[in-house]
Amino acid sequence: METKALILKLVKSKPFVQSRDVLKRKKISRQTLAQHFRELIEQGKLIKKGETRNARYFLAAKAKKGIGQISVFKKSFFIEGLGEDRVFEETNLKLNLKKILSKEGLEIGRFAFTEMLNNAIDHSRAPKVAVEASCDGIHFHFKVEDKGIGAFENLKNKFKLRDHFEACELMLKGKQTTSPEFHTGQGIFFTSKIADWFRLESANLLLTVDNTLPDLFLKETKKIRGTSVSFRIRQKTKKDLKALFDEYTDSDFEFDKTHITIHLVRKEGSYVSRSEAKRILFRLDQFKRILLDFKHVAGIGQGFADEIFRVFHSQHPEITLEPIHMAESVRFMVERARGGQRPL
């Protein structure tokens, strides 16, 4: 499909388009893509909001109806003595969120905003935190940034991990916190799952969770100081926060289930060795139910499968292991391990 036609098709199907949306689907340079955007703006088909790589492009016809007219609240706070609820209420008043968001959207926005801000307050070791929130007629978006130790570095130090990849992997399991006396480690887990789009950048890693696909991505980037967390959800969402909690908690309201995306945590090679399996299993004995998601995984090794589905299971028979999205080659190895056959 010709690039301009692709841009217009995308922007008609979603509130706005960014460069990365097009670059995922078409192999062209950023300079060429920028020229296509300029021409569509000159033709009156698109309008642009923001600058550089974070610019958002809206269909001009939508903008005339109020979509794309962004209301923004932006402020920095000293962390000492800061209350996350107070900051959310200030944001709520400035953007009139109670009127703009659906009842469900306000509940989700409050939960996600206060959880992410509280993480910065309690864990960042930074003197200040910057908050930005906006509504564009379609989405509620917020960003929380600090210049502290960094989320991945903090976890790496606390649990004596080898690198930031392992820290990210551990963080996504849930129940992982550097301050267990104050935190349950559930904030990022549930915030990333209820969002339409969630991004966390720290050290040299960028984690993106896109629940509209659904999929998640982890890539190396230019190293930054501290942590930046961004969250986006539709203003009139009907997502049910309680239903999400119920999915991952038992009848006693204990957070007992987690969802591990296998392809995200591979650093090199394939899923073959026992050591790779042990890394994935690290601290999963805290859960009673574990979803192992093999989406995008073409195959696994015998040692990898045996370590998870025979050894770990025999050590923790009370834990339910549920593999999902398996290719036939993966299914074969899982069933072989569960059948009690030892690797050749």
Image (cartoon, rainbow, N blue to C red):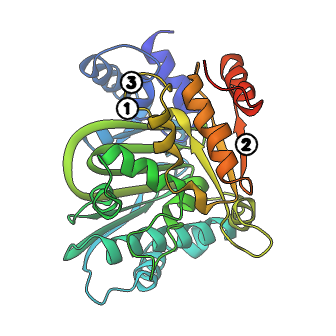
Quarter-of-image position of residue 330: top right
Residue shown at 53%/47% (left/top)?
Answer: 281
Mark 2, residue position: 322
- Mark 2 or mark 3: name the one nearer the start of the chain: 3
Residue found at x 65% / y 51%: 315
- CA gap between label 3 and label 1 equals 40 Å
Camera-side mark, 2 or 3:
2
- Seen from this angle, which residue lies furthest right? 251
Label 2: few (<14), some (14–19) or many (≥20) C-alpha neighbours in 10 Å: few
Q: Position of residue 99 (x, y in %)?
A: 60, 73
Nearer to me, 36 or 150: 150
The residue that label 3 is drawn on is 40
| Amino acid of disc 1 | Lys
- Residue 155, percent across and down? 34, 60
Which comes sooner in the sequence, label 3 or label 1?
Answer: 3
Compared to residue 268, the image places residue 166 above or below, namely below
Residue mark closest to the camera, 3 vs 1: 1
In the rendered structure, which amino acid carries the disc numbered 3?
A: Leu
**Regarding mark 2 in the picture, which secondary structure is present there?**
strand
* Secondary structure at numbered mark 3: helix
* Location of mark 1 (residue): 267
Mark 2 and mark 3: Cα distance apart in space: 48 Å
* Camera-side residue of 194 and 39: 194
Task: Confirm or deny contact between disc 2 and disc 3 (CB under 8 A).
Answer: no
**Mark 3 surroundings: few (<14), some (14-19) or many (≥20) residues within 10 A:** some
Q: Observer-nearest residue: 334 or 97? A: 334
Q: Is residue 3 above or below residue 66?
A: above
Q: Amino acid at mark 2?
A: Glu
Does residue 23 appear left or right of residue 252 in this picture?
left
Indicate whether 208 appears above or below 191.
above
